[in-house]
């Protein structure tokens, strides 16, 4: 088999069948590139339309979400749930509420989720959903009415053995609460395992809030250790200031690093002496303010409306905001500033050009599907606790998360070595995630 030609054929088909979805194309291109190594060794992974099936969602649901704002006006948003692949378990993946949401973005996130969930070693399939609703500037009552309308349709498609949504950008504890309440009302059942990220006194898990950020830092620790470096004393840039960023900052500083900058979509804050995490949480989680407010209240912090957060001296960069936020030019800046490690806390925050720069400049790079898998892994631990009507301690759950992240790192590292691309954690993650899903798909027949 001419692998390059076969893979190009798959990709051309993807472009034709999914026009106008650049993020989805980008996510598929990266995986297909890694799969060339697999297909050269094992042609049977091209059997039974496996790759074509893997790149086509099992089901895509698009629905109208009408709701009434505080002025009595009717607003109409669009809701999505893409149930991509359930070969390993029920679909699992977050909901994103952001004005940029469209089908292509949800498909890219759902596709990534298949491999990420496979890497966790837990029995969960891949899915993703969301809406173009923007919670920013909306009152709690408006958010509640939106969530109730969204769940009025979504409830018929989810369930603890079917599809288990969670949070993502714009969907935190408040939104999960409103969504769960409406699910309970629509079904008449208190089915805790249907949503994760729940409140602690109604089925939530300790560590779930912290899990993605903590997990990204645990993965980075492993990657640094493999290069005989420690996090203690490192200078770290973290983009974003949402759920993932805040807890990445907290864990990195607990481990002795100094976080020298963070951001939101209005600009970035430089913090050469480190971040006051309690103040940041108060500003972002409680008051829901912009990062400039942090800079006015903290000592030694400066807000920059213009400029580039990646243009700062550091050892490690953790992009934790959104897709394609770190491009080739920014990657060059990072390299020039001495950065030696990049781990994606967000999904696909680095462009292909940036990843190419990391390769050339020998910067160790961890893709999101491996580095940020701690969030969904802990969601799966929440499902385990719900199924057994149990709740675990913080320390025990955190230890499980740490072990899972260590295993994901080992799996990426060893798989890269097996395919003679040592240190290429992108290929390692894609191949390790793919093989488990592919073997199960071949075993379960043409579905
Ligand atoms: P949040 O909504 O809590 O925070 C998102 C952060 O990113 C905010 O600081 C936001 O700033 C910033 N941001 C969002 N869009 C943009 C943009 N277009 N330009 C600049 N900044 C932007 O989301 P999360 O922290 O939950 O998610 C962050 C990333 O991590 C996403 O890629 C998500 O898919 C990924 N992820 C999240 C997981 C989780 O458990 N929450 C699990 C795995 C991955 P602003 O407030 O100004 O918009």
Image (tube, rainbow, N blue to C red):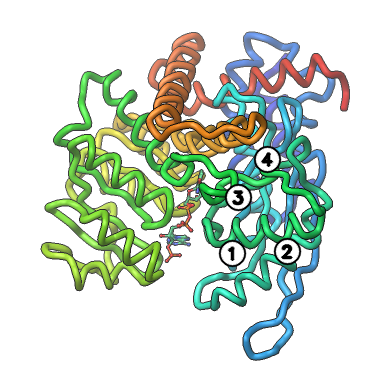
- The residue where tag 4 is placed is 193
Give left or right: position of 129 versus 187: left
Name the spot of residue 85 as percent of width and height, x first.
74, 34
Name the spot of residue 372 as percent of width and height, x first.
46, 38
User: Of the residues under marks 2 and 1, which one precedes in the sequence?
Assistant: 1
| Residue sitting nearer the eye, 401 or 320 | 401
Name the spot of residue 105 as percent of width and height, x first.
63, 53
User: Of the residues under marks 3 and 1, which one precedes in the sequence?
Assistant: 3
Q: CA distance from mark 4 to mark 2?
A: 19 Å
- The residue where tag 2 is placed is 150
Q: Quadrant of residue 289?
A: bottom left
Asked if disc 1 is less than 8 Å from ligand 1, the answer is yes
For residue 100, which numbered disc appears in the image? 1
Q: Secondary structure at mark 1?
A: loop
- The residue where tag 3 is placed is 23
User: Of the residues under marks 1 and 4, which one precedes in the sequence?
Assistant: 1
What residue is at 64 percent from the left and 18 percent from the top?
A: 435
């Amino acid at each position: 088999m001419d692998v390059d030609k076969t893979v190009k054929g798959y990709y051309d088909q993807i472009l034709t069948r999914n026009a106008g979805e650049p993020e989805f194309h980008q996510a598929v291109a990266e995986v297909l590139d890694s799969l060339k190594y697999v297909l050269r060794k094992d042609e049977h992974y091209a059997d039974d339309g496996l790759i074509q099936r893997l790149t086509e969602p099992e089901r895509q649901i698009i629905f109208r979400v009408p709701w009434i704002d505080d002025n009595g006006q009717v607003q109409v948003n669009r809701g999505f749930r893409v149930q991509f692949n359930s070969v390993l378990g029920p679909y699992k993946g977050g909901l994103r509420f952001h004005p940029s949401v469209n089908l292509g973005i949800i498909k890219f996130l759902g596709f990534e989720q298949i491999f990420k969930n496979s890497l966790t070693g837990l029995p969960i399939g891949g899915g993703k959903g969301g809406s173009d609703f923007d919670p920013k500037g909306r009152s709690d009552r408006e958010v509640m009415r939106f969530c109730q309308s969204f769940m009025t349709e979504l409830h018929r498609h989810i369930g603890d053995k079917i599809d288990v949504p969670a949070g993502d950008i714009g969907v935190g504890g408040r939104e999960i609460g409103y969504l769960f309440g409406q699910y309970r009302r629509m079904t008449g059942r208190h089915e805790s395992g249907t949503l994760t990220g729940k409140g602690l006194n109604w089925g939530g898990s300790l560590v779930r809030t912290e899990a993605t950020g903590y997990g990204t830092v645990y993965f980075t620790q492993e990657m640094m250790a493999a290069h005989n470096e420690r996090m203690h004393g490192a200078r770290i840039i973290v983009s974003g200031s949402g759920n993932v960023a805040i807890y990445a900052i907290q864990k990195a500083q607990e481990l002795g690093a100094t976080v020298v900058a963070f951001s939101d979509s209005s600009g970035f804050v430089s913090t050469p002496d480190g971040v006051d995490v309690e103040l940041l949480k108060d500003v972002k989680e409680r008051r829901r303010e912009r990062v400039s407010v942090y800079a006015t209240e903290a000592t030694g912090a400066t807000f920059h409306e213009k400029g580039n957060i990646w243009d700062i001296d550091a050892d490690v960069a953790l992009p934790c905001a959104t897709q394609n936020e770190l491009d080739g030019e920014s990657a060059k800046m990072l390299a020039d500033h001495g950065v030696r490690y990049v781990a994606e806390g967000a999904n696909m925050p680095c462009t292909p050009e940036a990843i190419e720069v990391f390769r050339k400049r020998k910067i160790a790079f961890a893709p999101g599907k491996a580095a940020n898998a701690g969030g969904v892994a802990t969601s799966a631990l929440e499902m385990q606790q719900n199924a057994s009507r149990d709740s675990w301690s913080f320390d025990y759950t955190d230890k499980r998360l740490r072990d899972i992240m260590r295993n994901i790192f080992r799996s990426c590292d060893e798989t890269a070595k097996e395919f003679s691309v040592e240190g290429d954690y992108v290929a390692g993650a894609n191949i390790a995630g793919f093989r488990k899903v592919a073997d199960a798909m071949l075993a379960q027949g043409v579905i």
